[in-house]
Image: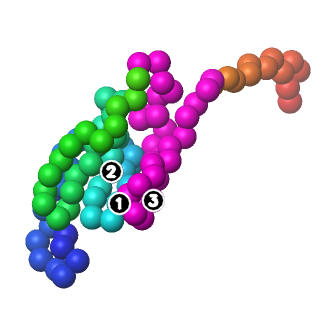
Amino acid sequence: MPPAGGSPRLVVTSDLRSTWELAGRSIYYLNGDRAVWVYRLDNGRRFEYARFPPGASPIFMLGNLTVSADERVIIYPAVDRRESDLMLVENFR
């Protein structure tokens, strides 16, 4: 929706899964293909900003992305490994 009011309009059609960030005049988002995409609010241009190499951590599943206000820095979490423990509890009451 425009800040001055008016009708809302759809600007990004991919499944964002809450993985997006508004910075400057752009929306930065991860769309599940291991790439950061940008939608420019001022001119409607959409483009791939960065692509992560095969084997990189699955950042698109984590749902976090931060872009600095000047749009020069992107921060995202990287997962080195995922672990869990399975424990057996006997005689539980």
Residue type, numbered disc 3: Ser
Label at residue 28 = 2
Label at residue 22 = 1
Residue type, numbered disc 1: Leu
Q: Is residue 59 magenta?
A: yes
Q: Quadrant of the C terminus?
A: top right
Point out residue 27 in the picture as x, y percentages from the top left corner.
29, 55
Foreground disc of the pair 3, 2:
3
Q: Nearer the viewer, residue 59 or 9?
A: 59
Badge 1 marks a residue whose secondary structure is strand
- Tag 1 and tag 2, C-beta contact below 8 Å: yes
* In the image: residue 87, left or right of residue 16: right
Q: Is residue 70 magenta?
A: yes
Q: Residue at x 21, y 43 (%)?
A: 47
Label 3 belongs to which residue?
Answer: 68
Q: Image height check: is 34 above or below 48?
A: above
Label at residue 42 = none
Disc 1 to disc 2, how far (Cα)?
6 Å
Badge 2 marks a residue whose secondary structure is strand
Point out residue 77 in the picture as x, y percentages from the top left corner.
54, 40
Point out residue 44 in the picture as x, y percentages from the top left corner.
13, 56
Badge 3 marks a residue whose secondary structure is loop
